[in-house]
Image: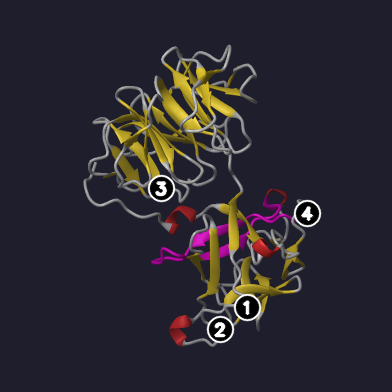
């Protein structure tokens, strides 16, 4: 593992992944098209109703060579059915955004993704086609008029649309094997796939920006910007045995004394949470409720950081736990296999052929 300053979240994590793209323009004002999604009629790109799942298009981001924040955007709607427009790419005629033939490289548009300040997963999307030739539409941004998706002038901030990228595959998992290397699993029922040169860690979690955080063999924190990046040590970050991320981005760890500790950022100091033991693993639900594993390998919940732990009856025996986007609870049994329960009070159900792992984290489509 390398010791340098921690890397910031990288847009390279978006490469070769599929996303639904939803409009977030003036959602705070309840604008009628809020959360409508990027779709198409014929070759015309349009906004479709937010609850129209029939025409909900997965878009694949293909990295532009030599660029970390520019992507070609290709349609993946019904590709499994050989739909004729599969892999056609997002381009434009005049200022109208259209699908172009997949093998048309002349009009293959690089789109630059610019993170919206303070918003996770939201981006402004700007055209970079022939910018090196001073093409007149360079840096015009993806916007709309009515339900027609169009390019808007680069200095038109009134119609500057934040687009939210929602991962299509949100049920993937990141695990740590018994060899202390990372493994990925596309779904609960997929096979584990080893990530080469990814050791050695004992626990792992994922930040909202997709940064992977692991605990090294020395109980210090390490980060890697992407699955294939190198581990980078976070100085003065020990000593912890387990880690999770709260919905607001706060980092929660378990100290060597089985008590909870928090740090506001990766480089902050650990702050002890009084009367928070004794637990060996912890995760956070979307509503902020903590789920911990006691020293008896049973589940415990904690409504807030300062609440008391409450035992979940008949919830053993597990050694690690994570929460899937749909609320499914996934644990690691004493046999190092995965188990799931639909709710906190459901029974554990074994996931066949899911071992051997010592740590697991829901990726929420971020890796």
- 101 relative to 272 in the view: left or right: right
The mark found on residue 137 in the picture is: 2
Mark 3 secondary-structure assignment? loop
Q: Which residue is mark 3?
A: 211
Mark 1 secondary-structure assignment? strand
Q: Quadrant of residue 68?
A: bottom left
Mark 2 secondary-structure assignment? loop
Quarter holding the N terminus is top left
Residue occupying image coordinates x 56% and y 72%: 108
Residue 275 in view: yes
Q: Tell me where the magenta segment starts and ends, as one range.
A: 54-79
Q: Is residue 310 above or below residue 52?
A: above
Q: Which residue is mark 4?
A: 52
Classify 10 Å Cα crowding around label 3: few (below 14), some (14-19), many (20 and above). many
Mark 3–mark 1 Cα distance, whole angstroms, equals: 32 Å
Q: Which residue is mark 1?
A: 151
Number of marks present in the image shown: 4
Relative to the observer, which residue lies in front, 102 or 157? 157
Q: Position of residue 177 (x, y in %)?
A: 39, 27
Q: Position of residue 327 (x, y in %)?
A: 62, 33
Mark 2–mark 1 Cα distance, whole angstroms, equals: 8 Å
Residue occupying image coordinates x 48% and y 31%: 283
């Amino acid at each position: 593992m390398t010791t340098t300053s921690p890397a910031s979240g990288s847009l390279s994590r978006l490469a070769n992944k599929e996303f639904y793209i939803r409009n977030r323009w003036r959602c705070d004002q309840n604008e009628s098209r809020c959360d409508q999604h990027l779709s198409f009629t014929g070759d015309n790109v349009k906004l479709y109703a937010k609850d129209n799942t029939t025409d909900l298009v997965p878009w694949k981001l293909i990295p532009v060579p030599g660029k970390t924040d520019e992507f070609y955007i290709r349609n993946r709607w019904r590709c499994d059915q050989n739909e004729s427009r599969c892999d056609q790419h997002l381009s434009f005629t005049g200022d109208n955004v259209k699908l172009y033939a997949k093998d048309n490289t002349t009009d293959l548009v690089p789109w630059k993704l610019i993170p919206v300040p303070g918003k996770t997963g939201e981006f402004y999307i700007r055209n970079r086609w022939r910018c090196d030739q001073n093409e007149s539409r360079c840096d015009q941004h993806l916007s709309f008029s009515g339900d027609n998706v169009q390019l808007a002038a680069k200095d038109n901030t009134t119609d500057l649309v934040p687009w939210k990228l929602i991962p299509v595959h949100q049920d993937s998992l990141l695990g740590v094997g018994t060899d202390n290397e990372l493994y990925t699993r596309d779904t609960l029922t997929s096979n584990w796939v080893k990530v080469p040169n990814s050791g050695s860690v004992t626990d792992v979690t994922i930040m909202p920006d997709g940064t992977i955080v692991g605990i090294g063999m020395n109980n210090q924190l390490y980060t890697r910007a992407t699955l294939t990046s190198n581990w980078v040590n976070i100085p003065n970050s020990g000593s912890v045995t387990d880690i999770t991320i709260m919905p607001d981005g706060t980092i929660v760890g378990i100290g060597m004394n089985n008590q909870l500790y928090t740090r506001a950022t990766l480089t902050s100091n650990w702050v002890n949470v009084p009367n928070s033991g004794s637990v060996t693993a912890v995760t956070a639900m979307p509503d902020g409720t903590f789920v911990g594993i006691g020293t008896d390998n049973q589940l415990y919940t904690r409504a807030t950081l300062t609440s008391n732990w409450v035992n979940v009856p008949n919830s053993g025996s597990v050694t690690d736990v994570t929460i899937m986007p749909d609320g499914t609870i996934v644990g690691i049994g004493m046999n190092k296999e995965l188990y799931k329960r639909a709710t906190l009070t459901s029974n554990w159900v074994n996931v066949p052929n899911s071992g051997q792992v010592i740590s697991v984290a829901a990726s929420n489509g971020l890796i």
